[in-house]
Image (tube, helix red, strand yellow):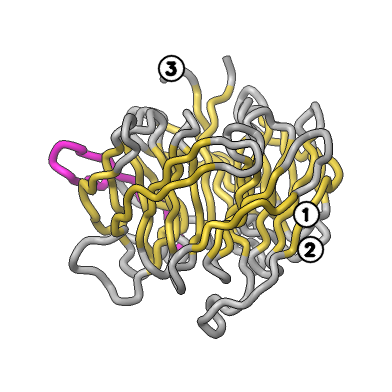
């Protein structure tokens, strides 16, 4: 817990109201961000940090941009890499920071790029375009890749496609560096599987569906040809009284993985669940408003006692202290204004 933390928030910059990435000092004890500066990136729609905390990656119009994270929290650009496709919507790296995985909502493409020793982005290794038709015109009638991750065992890449209601599973290794389709998880029709996250032990993963407004819990076991996956729970992302226009849009695990959080657009709420680390199952604690519009991302503070809601439509970040016992989100001070924020990551810096 001790140490200095920074927050980096990616925003759209096309209208000149934001430069792209806003840098904040983090007050962990009070659960607040303190604005420091802005860094130019064209339309930063998603940001992540490398697992070693030394590099920040952002989606941009030009592809993927990498930044060195300095010990004082400042960032300087390393390089950018073209993904040879339409702009991405989601990024992830593997456990060893060897590759970065880019998801393409607009063109239905999942792209794998190499990461260099210094953290900069290297060349494209491989990529696949999804094909097929969904069922709802305009929303999910064609492929929309929304999340790509390497599995914790390192053997596969799983790719969520909310347009065709599937998670495709590709075999991948460092020797061949090809994505070979070995299986597909067929989700409910018109559920729109948006994002999934693994527990750090690799035994479970959690999938949030944008149109169905549920989180599905799966067990995961590795295999030679394909993994063994079993659904063990489905739980709603919203309470009994919610907006009919609700769309589940973000999901995070707490740092100790004892809790899970889900943001709901339309309903403009955040749901909090307690997670059983042995069984992987979730139990809802609360679903409460976030005093903003479209919580496109949720940022969990290092102490797991506070969250920041990244509110895209209202151009704000709102801060809450969580009372897990009483099931409450208590707002802890004024909102911070930031133009059309999309994504946030907190990084430990310095010694």
Q: Secondary structure at mark 3?
A: loop
Of marks 1 and 2, which one's residue comes earlier in the chain? Answer: 2
Q: Considering the image in quadrants, where does the C terminus appear?
A: top right
Specify the label residue 127 is tagged with: 1
Marks 3/2: CA distance? 41 Å
Q: Which residues are magenta?
A: 315-331
Residue 25 lies within the magenta run: no
Residue lying at 35% horizontally and 70% vertically, measured from the top left: 246
The residue lying toward the viewer, choosing from 190 and 332, is 190
User: Residue 203 location in percent, x, y?
Assistant: 45, 34
Upstream in the sequence, badge 3 or badge 1?
3
Residue 177's tag is none
Question: Would you name the residue on which mark 2 appears?
Answer: 85
Crowding near pointer 2: few (<14 within 10 Å), some, many (20+)? some
- Counting from the top left corner in percent of width and height, residue 242 is at 24, 69
Q: Position of residue 76 (x, y in %)?
A: 73, 36
In the image, which is nearer the foreground, mark 1 or mark 2?
1
CA distance for labels 3 and 1: 40 Å
| 93 sits left or right of 327 in the view | right
Q: Residues within 10 Å of mark 1 (few under 14, many from 20)?
A: many
Q: Earlier in the sequence, mark 3 or mark 2?
A: 3
Residue located beneath label 3 in the image: 2
Is the residue under label 2 in contact with that under label 1 (CB below 8 Å)?
A: yes
At horizontal 39% and vertical 50% (from top left) the residue drawn is: 231
The residues bearing labels 1 and 2 have C-alpha atoms spaced at a distance of: 10 Å
Task: Name the residue furthest top.
Answer: 351
Query: Is the residue 15 above or below the residue 344 in the image?
Result: below
Front tag of 3 and 1: 1
Q: Above or below — where is 307 with respect to 152?
A: below
Q: Secondary structure at mark 2?
A: loop
Spot the residue most to the left. 326
């Amino acid at each position: 817990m001790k140490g200095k933390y920074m927050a980096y928030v990616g925003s759209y910059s096309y209208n000149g109201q934001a430069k792209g990435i806003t840098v904040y000092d983090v007050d962990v004890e009070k659960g607040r961000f303190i604005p420091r500066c802005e860094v130019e990136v064209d339309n930063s729609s998603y940001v992540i940090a490398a697992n070693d905390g030394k590099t920040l990656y952002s989606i941009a119009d030009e592809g993927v941009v990498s930044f060195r994270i300095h010990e004082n929290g400042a960032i300087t650009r390393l390089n950018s890499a073209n993904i040879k496709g339409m702009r991405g919507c989601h990024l992830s790296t593997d456990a060893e920071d060897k590759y970065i995985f880019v998801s393409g909502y607009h063109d239905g493409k999942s792209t794998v790029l190499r990461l260099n020793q210094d953290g900069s982005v290297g060349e494209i290794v491989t990529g696949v375009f999804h094909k097929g038709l969904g069922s709802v015109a305009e929303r999910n009638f064609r492929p929309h890749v929304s999340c790509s991750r390497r599995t914790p065992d390192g053997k596969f890449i799983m790719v969520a496609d909310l347009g065709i209601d599937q998670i495709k599973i590709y075999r991948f290794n460092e020797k061949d560096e090809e994505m070979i389709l070995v299986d597909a998880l067929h989700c409910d029709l018109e559920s729109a599987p948006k994002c999934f996250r693994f527990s750090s032990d690799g035994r479970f993963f959690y999938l949030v569906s944008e149109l169905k407004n549920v989180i599905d819990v799966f067990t995961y076991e590795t295999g030679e040809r394909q993994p063994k996956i079993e659904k063990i729970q489905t739980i709603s992302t919203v309470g009994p009284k919610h907006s009919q226009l609700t769309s589940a849009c973000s999901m995070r695990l707490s740092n100790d993985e004892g809790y899970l959080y889900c943001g709901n657009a339309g309903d403009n709420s955040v749901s909090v669940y307690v997670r059983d680390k042995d069984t992987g199952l979730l139990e809802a604690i609360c679903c409460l408003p976030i005093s903003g519009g479209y919580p496109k991302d949720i940022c969990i503070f290092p102490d797991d006692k506070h969250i920041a809601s990244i509110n895209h439509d209202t151009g704000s970040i709102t801060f809450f202290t969580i009372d897990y016992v009483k099931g409450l989100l208590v707002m802890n001070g004024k909102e911070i204004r930031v133009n059309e924020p999309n994504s946030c990551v907190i990084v430990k810096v310095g010694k």
